[in-house]
Image (cartoon, helix red, strand yellow):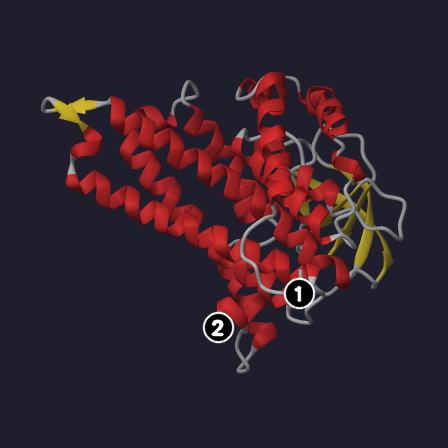
Amino acid sequence: MSDMILDLGEDAKEFGRQALRAFEAAGGDLLVQQAEAKLDERESLVGPKLAELGAWELDVRSDADELEAAAALCRSAGYWALPYPVAERLARPVDLDADGLLVIADIRPCAAVAGLDLRWVTTTLTGARSTVTGQGPAGPAFVTELTLSAVDDNGAGDVALGLVLPVWTLLGMLDRAIELTVAHVSLRKQFGQPLSQFQGVQFQLTDAEVERSGVDILAKYALWSIACGRSEALDDALALRMSAIEAAEVVFRVCHQLHGAVGFCDETTLSWLSRYSQPLRRLPYGLSATRDALTGRVGRSGLTGLFA
């Protein structure tokens, strides 16, 4: 994977398609609703299916092809708003006895892990690692505050992977949001013709698709950067995260506008996608804090590659 090829391999794509079908067969859009109703069933709803797919056997740190397969899996999980931290589990550290890795903020660390009895390791952007020893009450979208016990400062090498894989989950949500909206405006009629025929609607959808496709390319580049062990991998991961948050704001705004009021109702899949995209967009840092972190790292030297 030394040559820059900004596309996933066919095996990774096929693995992603298999995961899409498996998640649909397991319940699809109903899974997140069931998990929200019964928090302690998150693991039993999704965990066995992921194990059956071989998710936890993927070697994301030393095999570039399996890293691509992991990214495709995260994207499929996002497409169905799967109520499970797939990316975070795939990014688990190899030198500690843990089930998953959470990149956290220095102040009030939180993560969308409520209801899961798993061993979590956390790391800050600077590599300070801790184990999660307790959780606060479950909030919206499974987010809970974490109680930590410090371990060491050896997590810097894990941060890029821990930031990039969740963006692939968010990318799957953007895929689905646009797909749902295209279907909605094709069926909904106004003044005797489908909404999709109106130029203003077409312009809005084009804006959303440009943002989504941009994240698609940048996510593949950041994945390549990690696979190659580039020294700029963390810079690329932060730049990707910043771009993904900006794109998500545009995509979900356009999709909600074109759905109208129904887009905020629980009967609409877009509503669930939008709600469960929030932790991915806000944790460990939102847009401004991600931008500040990136600026603090690259300073006047700037970014390289596609982000330049």
Rendering quarter of residue 280: top right
Residue at 54% x, 52% y is 7
Residue 97 sits above or below residue 185 on the image: below
Q: Report how many numbered discs are placed on residues in the image.
A: 2
Give, as a three-letter code, the residue at label 2.
Ala
Left or right: where 273 falls relative to 156: left
Q: In which quarter of the image is the N terminus?
A: bottom right
Q: Where is residue 68 in the image (x, y as percent from the top left)?
A: 65, 48
Q: Which residue is outermost to the front?
A: 10
Name the residue tied to disc 2: 308
Residue 241 visible, this orientation: no
Q: Residues within 10 Å of mark 2 (few under 14, many from 20)?
A: few
Give the residue type that dot 1 points to.
Ser
Residue occupying image coordinates x 81% and y 34%:
118
Q: Which of 173 and 2 is in front in this view?
A: 2
193 or 259, which is in the foreground? 193
* Residue 7 appears left or right of 252: right
| Front one among 144 and 53 | 53
Circle 1 residue = 2
- The circle on residue 199 is none
SS for callout 1: loop
